[in-house]
Image (cartoon, grey):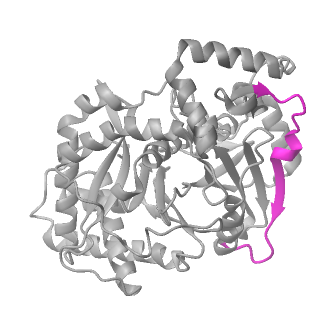
Amino acid sequence: MDASFWFMESATTPMHVGNIGIFEGPVAGFELEKLHKLIAERIAFVPRYRQRIREVPLQIGRPIWVDDDDFDLSYHVRGLALAKPGSRLQLDELVSRLMSRPLDRTRPLWEMSLISGLAGGRFAIVTKTHQAMIDGLMGIDISQVILDEDAQMSSPGSIGSWRPAPEPSGFELVTSAVSESIAHPDVAFDVARGAFKGVTSFASNLRRKSRGVAAAAVSFARVAAEPAMTVTALNVPILADRRLATGEFELAAFKDVRNKLGGSVNDIVLAVIAGALRTWLMGRGEAISARSQLRAVVPISTESTAGAASTIGPVSAFLVDLPVGEPDPVVRLRHISYQLAQYQDVSQLIGAETMINMASYGPPTLHALGVRLASNLSSRLYNVAVVNVPGPQHPLYVAGAKLVGSYPIMPLPQNQALSISLMSYDGHLCFGINADRVAIKDVESLMGCLRESLEELAQAANVRGDRHLRVIDEGEGVR
C-alpha cells in the first residue's frame, strides 16, 4: 500500500496530507531554533522521518526505505512569516501554495513550516507528510511526538545518537527483488506491468481489493449502484495548484442540534455539509432538482467501548448520499441518519473483513488512513470525500505554546476538485477545505455556506425539536 501511493503521485496529484496547527505563543515568543531543537530531540520516535525511498534498478521490485546519510533537519523544518495584518485569509493562501508543491522525492518525504506574524501574537506550524510514510498499522505523524499534554515540556529521556545504516548496493537490491519475485511471482508481475505502462499496478491491485469495501458499503447502506451524480464543479480533471479555506465551529452547537433532533454528531456534520453544498452549488448555477444527491465517501472510525473507557478502533470507507436537492434541513438530516444507521448495524461484519486495525491513534494518522481509503475507490463512485475524525478534548502544547486550532488538509485524487476534512479538538470542530485552484475559485464562500447551513439546522431544531430521532450517546467523541 505504501508503494501504491509512491507510484500514484503525479504532477497534479501530490500524495501528501497536511495539517495547520495554530498556537498561542508564550510571552517570550517562539523561534525556529526552538522548534529545531524540539524535533531533534524527538525525531528518534519516528525513525521513518530520517529515511528516504530508494527504487530498485529497472523497477523489478518494490521500492525500499533506506536511511538518509545526508539528512538535513534544517531543510525539512523552515521558517516563514506573514506580512501585516497576518489574517487567516493570508495564512490560508500561503498554505495553499505550500500544499501545491510536491515533496522532494530524493529526501525523507515530509516538511514542516513555522509561520510567524499571525494576528494576536499567534503562530502556525504546518506539516506535510507523504502518504507512503504513514503505515496503517504503525503510523505516527511527526506532529504527534512534538505535542505535550501540558505546558511544561516533557523530557524524552536518553535516546542515544543516530547513525544511518549502510545503504544497499544496486546488486543487493536486484538480488533481493529476484528472491521476492520467486517467492511472490504475482507481485513481480504487477511491478513489471506498472513499470512499462506508466500506471501503478499496485494501485490497480488496491482498487480490486477495495471493491470489496465499496461493495459492502453499497450493499449494507442500500446505496444504488449507478454512478455518482456528475457535478461540473466537483468532478473535473485537476491541475497542480490548490486553494484552501479553514474555519472552526463550536462543538457544542452540533451537540445541541443532536440533542434536539437525534442522530449522532457525525450525522449533524454531514447534514450541515449537505446543506452547505446545496447553497453553494445553487449559487454557482448548477442544476439542482428535488432529487439531486451528491455521493460522499466518508471514512469513519468505529468505537469499541469497555466499561467507561472508549477507544478509537478500525477505519472503513462508507458511501453516503447527501440529499442536496432537499430544501428541508431536518429531512436532510433524517435521510443521512437513516443511511448511517444501516452501517452501524453491520459495522462488526465489515470490520472483520476489510477494516484497517491501528496499533496507535492520532488524528493525523486517522486522516491519512481516511485519505487512503477514499483514494482507492474509483472517482466514478463518489463526488466528494469527507473525512471527520475525533481529536483530544483537552489542550495540547508545543514547547509551552498552546494549540488553539488544528485544521487537516486532504489531498485531491484525479477528477476530484474538492475535499472536506475536519477534526474535533478541545470543544471545537476544525474544518479544512482543499480545492483545485482553477476549478473552484470561491472556496472561501463554501466555508460561509457551512455556517449558514448550521444556523439553518439549529433554527429548525428549535422549532421541531420535539419530533426527534433517537439520540445516540457518544460521550465526548465525534464519529
Report x, y in % for residue 219.
Answer: 19, 44
Seen from the viewer's position, the closer of residues 160 and 22 is 160
Seen from the viewer's position, the closer of residues 288 and 434 is 288
Report x, y in % for residue 137.
Answer: 51, 26
Residue 54 horizontal side relative to residue 229, left or right:
right
* Residue displayed at 72% across by 41% down: 109
Residue 365 horizontal side relative to residue 52, left or right:
left
Q: Is residue 452 visible?
A: yes
* Residue displayed at 44% across by 75% down: 233
**Is residue 77 one of those drawn in magenta?**
yes
Q: Which residues are magenta?
A: 66-87
Which residue of the protein is positioned furthest toward the front in this rendering? Answer: 196
Seen from the viewer's position, the closer of residues 456 and 371 is 371
* Residue displayed at 42% across by 41% down: 207
* Residue displayed at 68% across by 63% down: 95
Report x, y in % for residue 193.
Answer: 56, 36
Location of residue 7 by image quarter: top right
Residue 343 horizontal side relative to residue 318, left or right:
left
Q: Is residue 162 above or below residue 265?
A: above
Q: Is residue 429 visible?
A: no
**Is residue 6 one of those drawn in magenta?**
no
Location of residue 173 by image quarter: top right
Residue 15 horizontal side relative to residue 170, left or right:
left
Seen from the viewer's position, the closer of residues 459 and 177 is 177
Location of residue 60 by image quarter: top right
